[in-house]
Amino acid sequence: MVLFSSPRKKGNSNTLANQIIKGAESAGAKVETVYLHGMDISPCQACYACQKKDSKGCAVDDEMQTIYPKLVECDTWVIATPVYWFTMSAQAKLFMDRCFALLAYTNNPFAGKRVAIAMSYGDTDPFNSGCVNALRTFQDAFNYVGAKMIGMVYGSAEEPGEIKSNTDLMQRAEQLGKKLGTQ
Ligand SMILES: Cc1cc2nc3c(=O)[nH]c(=O)nc-3n(C[C@H](O)[C@H](O)[C@H](O)COP(=O)(O)O)c2cc1C
């Protein structure tokens, strides 16, 4: 399952994620995509309804409800995000916060789950740009819940699709997709 979080459909993080999809599909994977931007997804309300015993799930009635069952069902998540203000996009963070409720949908939802990240940033340096901050956040979060981080692809680009000129990175994104599709 590929979660795009940039508002730019032909943007750089989407371009990288699409390259991952290309690799995964060539390896026989079935891929579903979700464009988080523009969906009706509210911030977590911290009501803790999802954490109560015998909870039926997240109490917020919005489009995140259509995503929860798919997140549980699929074996791999690919999260694509631009770096905004030295971390992931607000759309991606909002999605992550709402995943707090996943435990209410199934026992141990992250057991065996595999994760990959695709990220782009404007600065030339992954440390100065905040890319490393975002990667560390994903690493810490998925390590905490017991999911397995399979790989990350990230690079510098500004204009939508500019990242395509980084052929080495595009190749690595496709390879990552193949790896996700074959494991
Ligand atoms: C609101 C906003 C904040 C940004 N903040 C950063 C930043 O902190 N560091 C950086 O290197 N680039 C920053 N950028 C540049 C984007 O990360 C860069 O253009 C990226 O390639 C966009 O990805 P996309 O095409 O997938 O949307 C920012 C762009 C916007 C619109």
Image: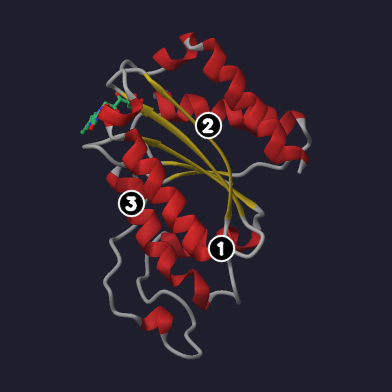
Residue 35: x and y in percent read 44, 42
Give the amino acid type for the residue marked by disc 2 in the picture: Ala
Q: How busy is the neighbourhood of tag 1: few (under 14 within 10 Å), some, or many (20 plus)?
A: some
Helix, strand or loop status at disc 1: loop
Give the amino acid type for the residue marked by disc 1 in the picture: Gly
Helix, strand or loop status at disc 3: helix
Instruction: Report the quarter where the C terminus lies.
Output: top right
Report the disc number at residue 17: 2
From this view, report whether residue 62 is shown above or below residue 84.
Answer: below
Q: Quadrant of ligand 1?
A: top left
From this view, report whether residue 75 is shown above or below residue 99.
Answer: above
Report the disc number at residue 146: 1
123 left or right of 102?
left
Give the amino acid type for the residue marked by disc 3 in the picture: Lys
Mark 3 = which residue? Answer: 93
Residue 91: x and y in percent read 33, 47
Residue 179: x and y in percent read 71, 35
Q: How busy is the neighbourhood of tag 3: few (under 14 within 10 Å), some, or many (20 plus)?
A: some
Helix, strand or loop status at disc 2: helix
The residue depicted at 62 percent of the width and 57 percent of the height is 113
Disc 3 and disc 1: Cα gap in Å?
19 Å
User: Quarter of the image holding residue 10?
Assistant: top left
Q: Nearer the viewer, residue 122 or 132?
A: 132
Residue 124: x and y in percent read 31, 18
Dots 2, 3 in contact, CB < 8 A: no
Which label lies toward us, 3 or 1?
A: 1
As drawn, the residue found furthest toward the front would be 127
From this view, report whether residue 151 is shown above or below residue 107.
Answer: above
The residue depicted at 49 percent of the width and 56 percent of the height is 142
Q: Going from the N terminus, do you reach mark 3 or mark 1 first?
A: 3
